Amino acid sequence: MTEEAELDLEVKDQAEFDELWAVRALRLVHGERALQYGHPYDVYSRARVMWMAILNVQLSWEQFCYCLAALKMCRELNKPGMTEDNNIDIIGYIAVLNRIVLKEAEIASEQSTGADQGPTDEASGVGEQELPAPEEVPATPGPSGRGRRASTRAPKGRAGNKRPRSRSRKA
């Protein structure tokens, strides 16, 4: 067999292997995970809103899904070839992004035609809503049950928590 023919077989084998990853990812996204958790729009909407609140930034769907994929990329880079799971999940997150974009287009179309699609993004607490300013964050109960305001400031280090010492001189 010629070197060129061997290379063609190798590329064909790799393409089939890659296709298997893609097929497995799509089967998970459209099959098993969809049956377990429902449409990814619902679950990922909640997660995205939580991330935006924690980070106090707006995240597009692309940014959110790419961040999920980046975590899997870091895991794969840390232990290359350890498992196919990371690579399948990376493909899956991009497939999920596609499903979410299609779902948003469907929702927009229904809203523009006036069709009843159930609760809107505003009512369900998901979507592109503005995050509250830090002073508008409601008080949350602390461990003692008393209300405390969530802080957006970074915690002070030990030195920042010390009280100034009084300097009394004895004569």
Image (cartoon, rainbow, N blue to C red):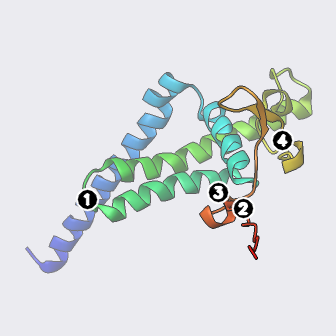
Disc on the earlier residue, 4 or 1? 1
Question: Does 10 sit above or below residue 97?
Answer: below
Residue that mark 1 sits on: 81
State how far apart marks 3 and 4 are (Cα). 25 Å
Q: Nearer the viewer, mark 4 or mark 2?
A: 2
Name which quarter of the figure residue 3 lies in.
bottom left
Q: Which mark is residue 63?
A: 3
**Residue visible at 68% across and 65% down in the picture:** 160
Query: Dot 3: few (<14), some (14–19), or many (≥20) neighbours within 10 Å?
Result: few
User: Which badge, 2 or 3, comes first in the chain's sequence?
Assistant: 3
Give the residue pinned by disc 4. Answer: 137
Neighbours of disc 2 within 10 Å: few (<14), some (14-19), many (20+): few
Residue type, label 1? Gly
Q: Is residue 16 above or below residue 11?
A: above
- Amino acid carrying label 2: it is Arg
Q: Does the CB distance between marks 4 and 2 fall below 8 Å?
A: no
CA gap between label 4 and label 2 equals: 28 Å
In front: label 1 or label 2: 2
The circle on residue 163 is 2
Q: Nearer the viewer, mark 3 or mark 4?
A: 4
Front disc: 4 or 1: 4
Residue 170, position as x, y percentages in the image: 74, 73
Q: SS for tag 2?
A: loop
Estimate how packed mark 4 is, as few (under 14), some (14 to 19) or many (20 or more) residues with alpha carbons within 10 Å.
Answer: few
Q: Tell me the SS state at disc 1.
A: loop
**Residue 64 appearing in the image:** yes
Mark 1 and mark 2 residues within 8 Å of each other at the beta carbon: no
Q: Earlier in the sequence, mark 3 or mark 4?
A: 3
Residue 169, position as x, y percentages in the image: 75, 74
Q: Work out how far the residue at label 4 is from the one at label 1, CA to CA, in angstroms.
A: 44 Å
Residue under the image location 72 percent in, 61 percent down: 163
